[in-house]
Image: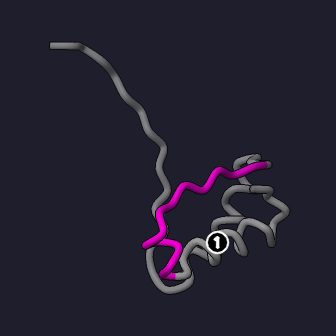
Amino acid sequence: MLNFQMYERVKVLFGNGAVNQLGELANHIGGKKALIISDPGMKGTGIVEKVEKGLSSENIHM
């Protein structure tokens, strides 16, 4: 068995419109670029476009 320690500082956003806060959060932690990985099914739901819009609003490049 491997011994390890793990510390994760995690912020979870949940609810209507939470995806719109992604750009603000990325900007807050100093993010400049984002990598979005998806499949055709997720893209078909429109969520990928919402993520891109939220990131673009805070000048986070993809």
Q: Who is closer to the viewer here, 34 or 46?
A: 46
Q: Is 57 situated left or right of 20 in this image?
A: right
Q: Who is closer to the viewer here, 20 or 56?
A: 56
| Residue in the image at 43% along x and 73% along y | 41
Question: Which x, y percent locates residue 55?
Answer: 73, 66
| Residue in the image at 48% along x and 81% along y | 45
Under mark 1, the amino acid is: Gln
Q: Which residue is mark 1?
A: 21
Question: Which x, y percent locates residue 34?
Answer: 69, 52
Is the residue 3 above or below the residue 6 in the image? above
| Residue in the image at 56% along x and 83% along y | 17
Q: Who is closer to the viewer here, 51 or 14?
A: 51
Residue 62 image-quadrant placement: bottom right
Magenta-tinted stretch = 33-45
Question: Which x, y percent locates residue 53?
Answer: 72, 75
The answer to if 59 sits in the magenta stretch is no
Residue ranking furthest to the left: 1
The answer to if 38 sits in the magenta stretch is yes
Numbered disc 1: secondary structure? helix
Q: Is 59 situated left or right of 9 in this image?
A: right
Other-residue count near label 1 (Cα within 10 Å), few / some / many at <14 / 14–19 / ≥20: some
